[in-house]
Image (spheres, rainbow, N blue to C red):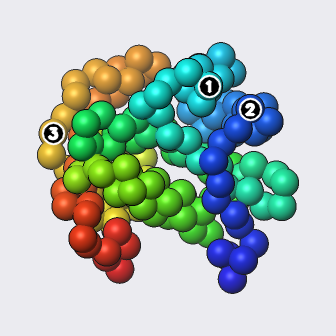
């Protein structure tokens, strides 16, 4: 049922205003509008998607494609739409896009304090493989480095 309500599509300039609003309510150090503009207009390594409920942006995610690796840059869902599977839909779409662009594996960083995100990533086959000390500038929190190996030829949604 969720799939019939929510559509995942490429992020365009018209989505940026709503993406920035979600960014501001989701992260202590949000990316500014100019960063998203640069990512979708000029960064040839970048791939960004939005989740739409009708015409309303309710979530977004992005990644950089570097050689055969996909690096998740950010993922957020509007607070009113959390807990209903939109983050999973976005991640699966990013994983599928990465495979279509010849990625063998995918990586991301996540705060140890972000239990819901960690649970999502674990459920998609990501493993905790390292730590970046003091990675988050707002509170000096570490970042857990997670990897999903063997994207190609495997079911991106193992559950």
* Viewer-nearest residue: 121 or 112: 121
> Which image quarter is the N terminus in?
bottom right
Q: Which callout, 1 or 3, points at the residue further toward the start of the chain?
A: 1
Q: Earlier in the sequence, mark 3 or mark 2?
A: 2
On the picture, is 120 further left or further right than 104? right
The answer for how far apart the CA atoms under marks 1 and 3 are is: 32 Å
Q: Is residue 116 visible?
A: no
Labels 2 & 1 near each other (Cβ < 8 A)? yes
Which residue, given by chain and number where applicable, does mark 2 sit on? 13
User: Dot 2: few (<14), some (14–19), or many (≥20) neighbours within 10 Å?
Assistant: few
| Helix, strand or loop for disc 2 | helix
**Residue occupying the far left of the picture:** 129
Residue 50, percent across and down?
A: 65, 49
Sooner in the amino-acid sequence: mark 2 or mark 1: 2
Which residue is disc 1 drawn over? 41
Number of numbered tags placed on the structure image: 3
* Quarter residue 87 falls in: bottom right
* Callout 1 secondary element: helix
| Horizontal side, residue 93 vs residue 5: left or right | left
Name the residue tied to disc 3: 130
């Amino acid at each position: 049922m969720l799939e019939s309500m929510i559509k995942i599509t490429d992020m365009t300039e018209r989505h940026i205003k709503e993406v920035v609003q979600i960014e501001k309510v989701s992260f202590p150090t949000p990316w500014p509008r100019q960063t998203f503009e640069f990512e979708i207009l000029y960064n040839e390594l970048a791939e960004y998607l939005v989740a739409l409920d009708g015409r309303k942006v309710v979530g977004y995610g992005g990644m950089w494609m570097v050689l055969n690796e996909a690096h998740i840059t950010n993922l957020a869902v509007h607070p009113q739409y959390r807990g209903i599977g939109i983050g999973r839909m976005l991640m699966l779409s990013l994983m599928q896009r990465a495979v279509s662009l010849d990625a063998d594996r995918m990586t991301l960083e996540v705060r140890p304090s972000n239990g819901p995100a960690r649970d999502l990533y674990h459920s998609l086959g990501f493993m905790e493989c390292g730590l970046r000390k003091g990675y988050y500038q707002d509170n000096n929190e570490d970042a857990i480095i997670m990897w999903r190996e063997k994207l190609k030829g495997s079911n991106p949604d193992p559950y």
